[in-house]
Image (cartoon, rainbow, N blue to C red):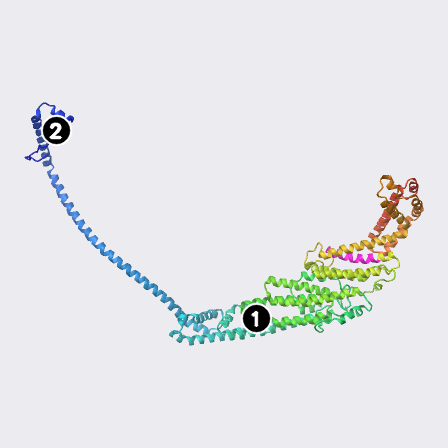
Amino acid sequence: MSPAGAQVSLDGMEELMERFAEHPIVREVLGGGGGIAGSTRDLEAKLRQVELGSIEDYVAESENLLALDREIDNCDAILGGMEATLEEFQGNLGSISQEIRSLQEQSMGLSHKLTNRKAAEEILGKVVDSVALSPAMVTGVMEQEVSEEYLGYLNALSRKIKSIATDQNLRGARALRDVEPELELLRVKAVSKAREFVAQRIYDLRRPKTNVQIQQQTRMLKFRHLVNFLRTHSLETFVEVRNMYVETLGRIYQGYFRTYLAAVDRLQRPACGRGDVVGVGDGGAGGVLGGLMGSMKMPGGLGGLGKALGGAGGGRSSDRPLRMGARGLLLRKVDQPAVVPHIAESEGKKFPYEVLFRSLYRLLLDTATSEYLFCTDFWGDTTVFDELMAPVLEAIREKLEEDLPEMYDAIGLLLMICVNNKHRILMQRRRVPGLDQHLDAVNLLLWPRFKALFDLQMASLRGTDPRALVSGEDVRAHAVSQRYADFSVSMLQLNAAQEDGQLGHNLERMRGAYCQVLKAGSGLFRERKRGAAWLANNYNVVTGALRDANSGGAVGASPGRGEKGPVLGQAGEGAIEFFEDLLAKATSGYVEETLGQHIGPMMNFVRSAEGRAAGSAGGSGAEGAGAAVDPAAVAMAGPILADFTKQWKISIQAIHKQVMASFADDFATEVLKAALTKLLLTYTKMLDALKEAGPEGAALLKEAINVPSIMYEIKKYSRQ
């Protein structure tokens, strides 16, 4: 609505009217019939009313409008203030941003300065720490006695000396020139104190009855840093105290072991002498063996131990020196403590050489283990051990070289070889290689002497005169068989664990020589039966000894193995099988010869019948069976059966008497059983042959003794 008095322009009205002529309102207005002038007046009247109403409303709301106007003015003022504040804050933010950038730049500068100062401080700190000598360290090094606390000062001094020597930054520093004289004084003083302390500890070891190992572990080992200090900062002083230790401990150990060796000589008990050999000969050991020993040259002279063991066998506690027996238990006692000489002497005990050998080397191994580990920890050098132990090992080696040429105990030597092997394994488990070369050298000393003694035993068998084994018509086993059995069992028992092929081959050679001697001796009997009985008795001794040992029945058997089961190894199993076969053949020969004296014709008859049966084996049925006995043979069977019927009880009694006279104990029972079984079997075969001979044979069988009667008679003797 335009204000009052304002002119209204009607330009374009017609165009608008034409444009909106079809509009419902326009059509209604135009269709009123009053005309445009009347409509205009009505419209103007309405407009005035509306205008007047608006004016009245404006007047009524004028106070509110004025209040609103004032509020708007207040808001404008407030907003203007806020605008000014914000503009001021914006200005302040700009200045703060500049300050922050400035602070960041300052912070980065300070950070670089701090880094540089830290780097400089670190370098200077090292220099100062390396050069500066604290009063506490100076006082401790110069005035305090050597103790565990003193080691701390010593380590600090060592670090300073090393740092100055290796730090390139200190070269030519003025501070270093000022400190070097004082540092040298401290080094000299520390070296002097360390030398004096270590030398005193070494000197203390010389006191009588001093336990060296305890002193080393409790009073010396914890001060090993003193030795490290001397090695690093005064090599000549280190070499001096090192040589002092080597000389002192070398003398101490050499004295200990020489004293022990001298005491051991008094504890020896001879186990086997020059004359203790398997075979026999003219003049005993002075014959064949005397010549062999005279021609053999061994290194070294006479030693107390060798003299004791190399005599003629006097003073031995065993009448079977070639039997190992309980001596084999030594291999189960390798880890036991060494023999204490004065205690053994007070108790009157004596020992064979191998026991003292084990005891000596047990003491050596324990001493060497302790010393080797100490030298490694304290001196940091195993050559110290090698140098100080060299005199001890040389003394022991010289003692062995002195004694071995006078030893004739092959069993003892083989035991020593086994002990030495166990010692080598023990030192390997301990990881102490210090004695490897010495133990290898001992092995090279023992084996040649053992081979020489084994060859002596072989020579004694080969040099045995078979006539010396046969005493008239006595068929009892000769002592040679017992000695051979003892020696073979001992060798097989000791060789079972290591299975040395050379020793097994030598035992086979000895077995051949023994069998050759026995075979020659059996041919000296006038009767083959007695020769067969003599062979069987000798083979039975050897077979029985081998069986007992292999089953664990022999005393000292199975060294290093279990208590039960075979203990002779593969070589022993082969020897048992070999001699069992020889024993079976000798027993069979004796049975044949004995039965031949009583039922010889019957045995010939049976052999002839079996031969004809074998020849006619190509026949069939009754023809082949009937050809086994011809009429002439049947005619010969009559007198044989008649004689057997009269004499069979007497023959059995005579066989029993002869067997019991030729053999002993269980073996006699076995031979008797074999002979009577053979007799019964031969008689049964003759009866079977006659059954196949037709009516003539059947007629003879009517007068024959029945088999149950003979079996009953045999059982009577079997129960005796």
**Amino acid beneath label 2:** Met
Circle 2 — which element?
helix
- The numbered mark at residue 269 is none
Residue 72, x across and y down, in percent: 14, 43
Magenta run includes residue 713: no
Query: Which residue in the structure is indicated by mark 1?
Result: 384
Residues shaded magenta? 534-552
Looking at the image, residue 264 lies above or below residue 8: below
Which element type, helix, strand or loop, lies under badge 1? helix
Q: Which residue lies at the image location 82% right of the left edge and 68% below the top edge?
A: 282
State the residue at coordinates (79%, 54%).
Answer: 581
Q: Note whether 250 is above or below 57 in the view shown.
A: below
Q: Nearer the viewer, residue 453 or 330?
A: 453
Image position of 491 (left or right of 48):
right
Residue 17: mark in rendering: 2
Instruction: Please state which of residues 510 and 142 is positioned toward the viewer in this rendering.
Output: 510
